[in-house]
């Protein structure tokens, strides 16, 4: 743990690889008196190694995060393990290390929105169309469910639908947004698209009934 004694609050001292307890209250336990606690290393977390400032993956992360610097922090992730196997790694995310990994840690709504914007930029650079569709859909769900950002959610859902007009979860999400806004014409169009791509007879019948009711009562 440390070379030489280091005393901490509560009567705890570190010396010779052992934790020495010299506060009277610490000695009293349900199992009897305790004089010291021996420490043994069970595992080791490989830390991320510094890379060149012009490394391509670092430059990409800077571009996506709208920043131009990287910092070292005193906590571990699986990033060092992946790096040790030859993968380029950058650890990033919303929030601040000033509030993380301590009591009452928190993240603000603004920081969550920044994270969603980051993931949107990642989706826009993702080459596989199916993956992009799923990413835009999930980003839209987070914006809608977690942040209450209906406009941002709708924009993300529409990006997914532009790539795949038959993506049922996106059609359903857009229909909900349209219905909540009392935009019944648009809600009917999304619902009609849903029923056209639905193969299960019972599910399609249910959607057709719902569509007929919507057109009869709202249009």
Image (cartoon, rainbow, N blue to C red):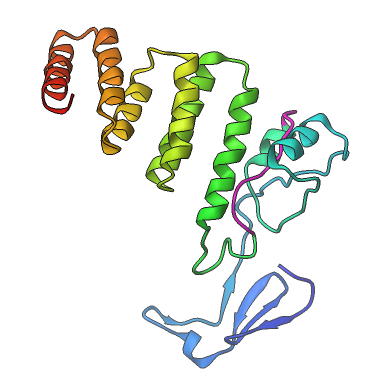
In the rendering, at what x and y percent does residue 189 appear? Answer: 29, 18
In the rendering, at what x and y percent does residue 12 appear? Answer: 61, 82
Find the magenta span and give its range: 85-96
User: How many marks do you count on the picture?
Assistant: 0
Of all residues shown, which one is farthest toward the front? 219
For residue 74, which quarter of the picture? bottom right
Closer to the camera in the image, 201 or 99: 201
Q: Residue at x 38, y 17 (%)?
A: 167
Considering the image in quadrants, where does the C terminus appear?
top left
Q: Residue at x 35, y 28 (%)?
A: 174
Q: Is residue 183 found left or right of 80 in the rendered image?
A: left
| Vertical position of residue 146 compared to residue 58: above or below | below
For residue 215, which quarter of the picture? top left
In the rendering, at what x and y percent does residue 7 appear? Answer: 69, 83
Q: Is residue 10 found left or right of 176 in the rendered image?
A: right
In the rendering, at what x and y percent does residue 113 appear? Answer: 54, 47
């Amino acid at each position: 743990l440390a070379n030489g004694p280091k005393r901490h609050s509560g009567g705890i001292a570190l010396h010779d690889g052992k934790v020495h307890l010299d506060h009277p209250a610490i000695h009293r336990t349900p199992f009897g008196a305790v004089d010291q606690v021996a420490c043994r290393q069970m595992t080791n977390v490989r830390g991320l190694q510094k890379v060149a400032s012009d490394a391509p993956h670092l430059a990409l992360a800077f571009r996506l995060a709208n920043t131009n610097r990287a910092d070292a922090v005193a906590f571990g992730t699986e990033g060092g393990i992946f790096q040790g196997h030859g993968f380029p790694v950058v650890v990033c995310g919303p929030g601040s290390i000033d509030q993380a990994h301590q009591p009452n840690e928190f993240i603000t709504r603004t920081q969550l929105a920044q994270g969603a914007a980051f993931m949107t930029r990642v989706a826009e650079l993702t080459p596989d169309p199916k993956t992009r569709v799923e990413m835009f859909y999930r980003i839209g769900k987070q914006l809608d469910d977690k942040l209450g950002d209906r406009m941002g959610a709708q924009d993300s859902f529409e990006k997914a639908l532009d790539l795949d007009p038959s993506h049922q979860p996106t059609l359903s999400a857009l229909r909900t947004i349209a219905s909540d806004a009392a935009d019944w014409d648009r809600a009917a169009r999304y619902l009609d698209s849903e029923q056209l791509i639905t193969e299960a007879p019972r599910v399609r019948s249910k959607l057709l009934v719902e569509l007929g009711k919507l057109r009869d009562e709202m249009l």
